[in-house]
Amino acid sequence: EIGHQNFPDKLSVPVRKYHAERVADLARRLDAVREGNGTVLDNTLIVYLSDSAETHHGQGTEWPMVLVGNLNGKLKTAGRYLEFPGYNKPGHRTLGNFYLTLLHAVGDKRKSFGEPDRELKDIDTAGPLAEILA
């Protein structure tokens, strides 16, 4: 009902704020637990992303997300904001590229993840996201 009413800001914004606060609380808790030379958060990556892509009835062409942590230095995430070109524009990247990046970060160097988008036949969407892979 929240997304289908004429007053989304009255309900959806507080819900999203609540979720963001839960992610921040989880990060604080993980950061409070010692592990090796650091904390559990140092060895963790929290991925917070939309359940419906770019808009309420999204097409899945954009997936805004927040990354907290860096998998013990395997990712370059701290204090950065990245925006990739829009769908079907040169330099566009896919959610598959993101998941491939996570696989590379943990040692799985496969070449692709998921099925390629046939609409992106003229766009190179191969490989991990070099922008966040350390």
Image: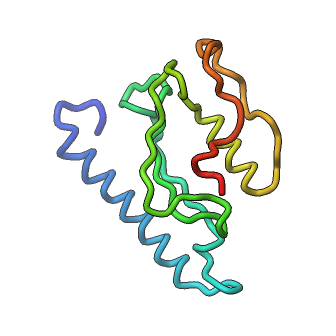
- Which residue is located at x 65 percent, y 52 percent? 133
The residue positioned 57% from the left and 32% from the top of the image is 93
Front position in the image: 97 or 22? 97
Q: Nearer the viewer, residue 51 or 130?
A: 130
Residue 114 is situated, as x and y percent measured from the top left of the image, at: 72, 30
Q: Compared to 30, does 24 lie above or below?
A: above
Figure label count: 0
Question: Is residue 6 depicted above or below 88 in this figure?
Answer: below
In the figure, is residue 63 to the left or right of 6? Answer: right
Classify the position of the N terminus by image quarter: top left
Tell me residue 128's x, y (percent).
Answer: 68, 41
Q: Residue placed at 42% from the left, 50% from the top?
A: 81
Residue under the point 45% across and 26% down: 86
* Residue 47 screen position, x and y as percent: 54, 54
* 57 left or right of 125 in image: left
| Residue 53 falls in image quadrant | top left
Which residue is at the front of the view, 126 or 13?
A: 126
Quadrant of the image for the C terminus?
bottom right
* Colouring used for the render: rainbow
